[in-house]
Image: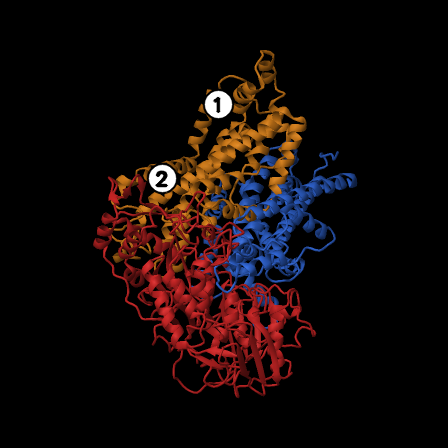
Amino acid sequence: MSSGDAISPPLAPAPAVAAAPVAAGRRPRGVWAIAWERFRRHRLALAGLGVIALLVVLTLLAPLISPYEPNATDLGSMLEGPSRAHPMGTDELGRDLFTRILYGGRVSLAVGFLAVALSVTIGTAVGALAGYFGGWLDNGLMRFVDFMLCLPTIFVLILLATLFGTNPVTIVVVIGGLRWMGTSRLVRGSFLSLREREFVEAARCLGAGSGRIILRHILPNSAGPIIVAATLGVAGAILTESSLSYLGLGIQPPMASWGNMLRNAQSQLVRAPWTAIFPGLMIFVTVLAMNYVGDGLRDALDPRKSEGSARR
Amino acid sequence: MTGYLLRRLLQAVPLLLGITVVVFVLLRATPGGPLSGYEGDPGITAEDVARLRQQMGLDVPTPVQYVRWLGAFLRGDWGWSLVTRRPVLEMIAERLPNTLLLMSVAFAVSLLLAIPLAVVSATRQYSLFDHAATLFAFVGNSLPTFWIGLMLVMIFSVGLRWLPAGGMYTLGEPFSVADRLRYLILPVTTLALSAATQHTRYLRSSLLDVIGQDYVRTAYSKGMRERDVVRSHAFKNAAIPLVTVIALELPLLFSGALITETIFAWPGMGRLFWEAAGRVDYPVLMGIFTVAAGLVILFNLVADVVYARMDPRIAYR
Amino acid sequence: MVARRRAVLRRARALAGAALLAACGPQGPQGPAGTESGGAGQPAPAGARPAQGAQPAGQPRPGGTLRIAVYQEPTVLNPYMNSQTVGSEVFDQLFQGLILVDPDGNYVPWLATEVPGVQNGGVSADGKTVTFKLRPGVTWHDGKPFTARDVVFTWQAVMDPSNPVTTRTGWKDIEAVEARDDTTAVVRFKEFYAPYLTLFGRILPAHGFGGQTAMDKHEFGRRPIGTGPFKFVEWVSGDHISLAKHADYWKQGQPYLDQLIFRVTPSREVSVAQLKTAEVDVVWDMIEAQVPEFEGHPDVDVWAFPGLGVERLVLNLSAPSGPAMGNPDTRHPILGDPRVREAIELAVNKKVLVDKLLYGKTTVAFSPLPTGWAAPRLPVSEFSPDRARKLLDEAGWKAGADGIRAKDGVKMQMAFATTSGNQLRELTQQVMQEQLRAVGIALEIKNVPSAVLLGTWADNSPRARGQFDVNMWTTNAGIDPHSHLFAYYHSSQIPSEANKGEGQNYARLKSDVVDRALEEGGASPDQARRKAAYERAIKGIVESRAHIFLYNRLDVDGARKYVKGHTNNPWSELTWDAESWWLAK
């Protein structure tokens, strides 16, 4: 259950931030173009991005790629090793493992991305409100963040999974709902420094409301760290789902996820190692790719890059 | 500094209190109660269940139960387990040292791995070694903890028979350090691997940050040798963010310990929690949550204090 | 859960509740791999008995330490307060009762010297007075003699209002227990209690609680004293419980082992790994899927045989929602029609479940009571999807475009729930889902943690409240089936607001025939009459298809080959005969 869900050091060296003025107020297209240039040069990150894209396409096209139904049992061919008919072998109900890997990938990736979408949304909202308005709101929200950080995550996760059940939606909500605090601290930090900057001042003078300033002016300028944290968060969320599955609290059958496929493989590790190897490999490859993408993004989006530093 | 400490401690009180309320409510909201196991056995009648509810104090409203729990807790009475009929404090006291042993050894090992890796990678940025270290960090970070643990058991216990598959010591033999170490190797490796990979990344980043700064450049320009620069200037400053990160990560290690204890049959807090959760044993669960949250708060406080000692620029208001 | 009962009745490992037991591990606890409900047991087809482990090989050799891996930990070493199935494995070594059930399902004397019956004068004509003759020369682990006063004490302790004992069923029907002399205990019931031989399954020492009967929070629960073949040595929580030979045990020369250690592991997988590495010698309660791994293994024997638990579908005959939810006088929109229930049974291929998922090691179920003195032999249900389709057609359910049937705008789609995290159950569900789909019935798997599925009325358990369509779990009837059959199938046992959730008739079966037969079976001390009454009741139950019995659960344990002297006993625990075990190494 670890994984680099970036809980970034809350106290970034203050002076460095001053060097980070991003195109004030204007649509930051230029910045993104530059970032992409930089990202492209990080070959491993590019490769990671390619792997993720490939996985997404493969899982979405699962019905076209595989002739089997993911849940169709075939008790005549249980636990068969990899063969031409079943490139990854079959599972304990004779289902085609490759097919289940594809469909399970949909679930695992969806859980990963959606949980992070949720946690980034919450984290950004909380961080932005706290950082922009400051005062009692900031105080209250940050105490809440402290509170959430003090909850022993895995214990709460287990409790919530029991409480709300284990369908994909609740798993997304539970994982996402417990992983947003790092993002909120990150966003708050960048809002605190940006809200006093000239371009914000200028927008205010021109009569822009708070909502507009937050969404149109400040947020785009703090997007970099958020994106990085989100990327690493996806990796973490996928691992978390698999850990929950290991404990029997993940996605329930017959729906496949890489995590529950791994868990089910446990009792036949020796007899049918392929049932464990392939889902494990998929988790590994996906998370590794996400980590490299995150690494590349960090380098690409970090304005201090020229100083040879990476945030985190 | 003392004032600061006091203030922080005072702040921790409502935090802890809030956590106990939330957890208490969550626990009661969880469907199925501690008596669910008794249902379905024709020998245990509704009358028996009602009697047990009353004997366990579950027949009064939740707020009253909470106040009773809190009152006793403040007097040092953590309650009695609903199923083992033993004091909760005693049960936790039995398990906590085992978890702390596992965690602290794993933690030490992870730092021993992470520090040299990070220093070399940072001073030789983009070298082959750096790439290799990055790969190691990412690989370690990309495998589910339980998967690493299961594989270690498959390979080193079931396959090679080099190390025991689980437990804390050999049954029926007197205590010896060597024996204990044999049992520690696999769980510690499992836990330390994922922790080390994270620490390596953090430390490398912050070292890179520091190395780019003026005073380090100055040191170089004064002709200091690289080793000395790293040792006397860069490392010390780079360690500051690491301390924060570590404080924030210790709870994660705690979580990792639950899975690791489950795989390696380590009799620690994580498993106690797992068992208590299965039996919906409220008093034990409350005790564990409180201890865990207390530890997290404590780690944070320690981190802040260490931070202050290491970085004189930080003023405590 | 079961456990408690088990402990009390010393029935098989599967106890009734067993299934439920699973419950013990609700979510959490189920352990990482599947939690099974504990249910292991099932009826044992006769002949399954001699354990593979019981090789005739050689003379027992005394000495040695045996380590047995258990994936649960007893909560407290007091047989009347423990709530984990595994407790009975430990209690079997520490405590003994008056009567034991042998592998063939016969009552045999244990701490008593004969089984009291009407014939031998041990039971009065009205069945209300039972006299137990006790074995002389038995000593407690602390050297004190065992006498009839301990029998009296056991009843008093169970009835002490301050003790959170799991059940008082049967005990509260006792008017008085009297120690006529050191070796004679007389139990007088207020009214006839048919399963009287199952009480006094574990005798507690009268001197164990400082002269009191209050047992709650007493240190006895951590340091027990009994009359069994092994005595308590130490208990390190989460790690192990170790026992040592009781030197003054009443069976000469036994036990053979010097030490017996229960090693607590977090899951079956961990237990099995330790068996492979020989860190333990025996593994308690494996799952079926672990059997093939050891087939032909050079060093490990698998002890697998059908136990007493019967895995079944429980169909809700009443409204599954709305204001009349769980009211037996309303009808379930789909399952309320007996033709539909029959079609479901016809559509399920039980044989395939047994052959493929249980590796052909067990038998297809035909009754809630697969074996024992009261068990009728009944035919196994037919597998005929064609007849199922015909019945459904007759009942007015017509297939729609997607192949799922519907009638009057109601689609034949139902929720199918069992305890989550139990791999065998999940596999069974997925196979049945396909089998029923083939005749046009859609089942949607909606599993919940066992603490939820098997919860109490007060906890709003969907099962108790009647808020379900099809559930699946295991339970077993034990050696005296009365309380089980009555609680699960008598119409007075339908949980409702009026009876405060009493009873386990979750299916809401209301049948005069069954009711009358069950009442008769509980009213007579005459075994032949009781057997005839239960046969009638069971026929009615099976025909009603309120429960559809799928297969008899396997009892599976594993041991290194050098462990000798064990005989499988479906009525009891794995370690019921540990006093006869020895090590050939």
Using the image as rendered, state which of residue B314 and residue C251 is in the foreground: C251
Which one is earlier in the sequence, the residue at label 1 or at label 2? 1
Question: Are labels 1 and 2 on one chain?
Answer: yes
Give amino acid for label 2: Leu
* The chain in orange: A
| Residue C40 quadrant | bottom left
Rendered hue of chain C is red
| Residue A31 - label | 1
Using the image as rendered, state which of residue B233 and residue A250 is in the foreground: A250
Tag 1 secondary structure: helix
Q: Is residue C327 left or right of residue B288?
A: left
Which quadrant would the C terminus of chain A be assigned to in this image?
Answer: top right
Kindly report the distance in space between the C-alpha atoms of the residues bearing marks 1 and 2.
28 Å
Q: Is residue A64 above or below residue A266?
A: above
Where residue A282 appears, as percent x and y from the top left, is: 38, 46
Tag 2 secondary structure: helix
Q: Is residue C350 visible?
A: yes
Q: Is residue C146 visible?
A: no
| Residue C360 quadrant | bottom left
| Residue A55 - label | 2
Q: Chain of mark 2?
A: A
Farthest residue toward the right? B2
Q: Is residue A58 left or right of residue B13?
A: left
Q: Chain of mark 1?
A: A
Using the image as rendered, state which of residue A174 and residue C313 is in the foreground: C313
Give amino acid for label 1: Val
Q: Is residue C167 above or below residue A275?
A: below
Where residue B216 appears, as percent x and y from the top left, is: 64, 35
Q: Is residue B189 above or below residue A223?
A: below
Rendered hue of chain B is blue
Render colour scheme: by chain
Q: What residue do we see at 57% from left, 25% from top?
A: A20
